Image (spheres, grey):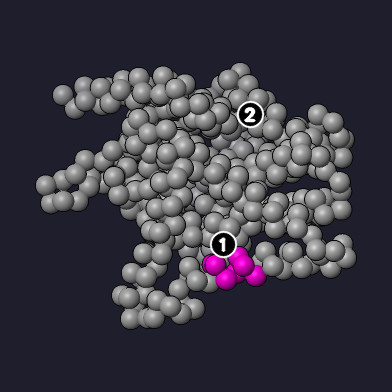
Amino acid sequence: MIQNVLRKIGFLSAFLLPVLLVLGFYSGGPFIWSVHLFVFILIPVMDYVLAKDQSNVPKSLVSQVSQERFYKWVTFGWVYVQYLMLFWSLYVVTFYPLSAGEWTALATGLALITGGIGITVAHELGHKSDPLEQFYSKAILLTVTYQHFYIEHNRGHHVRVATPEDPATSRFGENFYAFWWRSVSQGYLSAWHLERERLVKKKLNPWSFSNQMLVFHLTSLFFVLGLFFGFSWLAERWVWEVPVFFGIQSVLAFSLLEAVNYLEHYGMERKKLPNGRYEQVTALHSWNASEMVSNFFLFQLQRHSDHHWYAAKRYQVLDHHPQSPQLPAGYSAMILVAMVPPLWFSIMNPLLSRWRNAQMEDLV
């Protein structure tokens, strides 16, 4: 009972980030960087100091915990917080004279919220069959102009993960910046292809409103125009800051997503079978991290192997698998490492090699 309550409190921790960004801004000075320091320094330190969490929800309780409404309400609540933070940030850039440093801190801080937490929530909701959860997933992705992720991730990445056909699987020896361009560009084109393929099978016109990609582009356009004209009306001037700021935070947000993609499957490969297909996805095809604090903040996204094994499984009951490859630290720390390719390769390549050799020994 106590452990269940503590877990629930842990999953509320993500809501600290919006509070830190707002308080940091109004406090002024170096406090405007509070959310950055919390994410990239304090969380890794807490991850290092506290024991790792490798416990799983008992199988007898999985069904019960999966159905607890609290966990769903947390993700639903985040949708409204994300929109509130976006509108607040646009209000700030519209009515406050900001220095270049303050612009940078606000845009990157918001991206940690909309991309780091927001897209994680959108990812969780987008895998569910409930139409409301799917709607909320798309609503979050709208705030970072990355709605095609809903198509490409569910119908592309989860089918092709750990194969050369998957844009979101980073290759051995590939640095983050090369991966970013390949994943962003090819993932976008793949979403168009997948949607056209779906419509052709249903004998529907690909150039109609049945095409989700067209709908996504139109909603993004009208959303940005609505923000621009709305804030321009409030400020009684053409507020160029709104579309510029919105575009910057969007790119930063989905770049954070791509950094996470880079970590999750680096060097992972599924074997190609004699029939031309690939072996089934298992717990061996994703990098995991068992750090307790960052797992709470990311709704256990770091138990990524189990997510790929059972994509519809809810975040609160994802399992730790000891046979999965383990990152040396949580995502907050490893994202920084990935930004420096020589450092990333020096840490991850030997780790990947040792893990592969261990798997080969287990087969002998």
Amino acid bearing label 2: Phe
Residue 298 % position (x, y): 58, 40
Amino acid bearing label 1: Lys
Instruction: Give the camera-side residue of 206 and 225.
Output: 225
Residue under pointer 2: 40
Q: Are marks 2 and 1 in contact (CB under 8 Å)?
A: no
Question: Which residues are the magenta region?
Answer: 216-222
Quadrant (top left, top right, bottom left, bottom right) of the N terminus: top right
Residue furthest left in the image: 274
Q: At 75% across and 32% down in the image, what residue appears?
A: 34
Residue under pointer 1: 138
Q: State how far apart marks 2 and 1 are (Cα).
A: 28 Å
Q: Magenta segment: does it hold 103?
A: no
Q: What element does badge 2 sit on?
A: helix
Q: Residues within 10 Å of mark 1 (few under 14, many from 20)?
A: many
Q: At 74% across and 64% down in the image, what residue appears?
A: 228
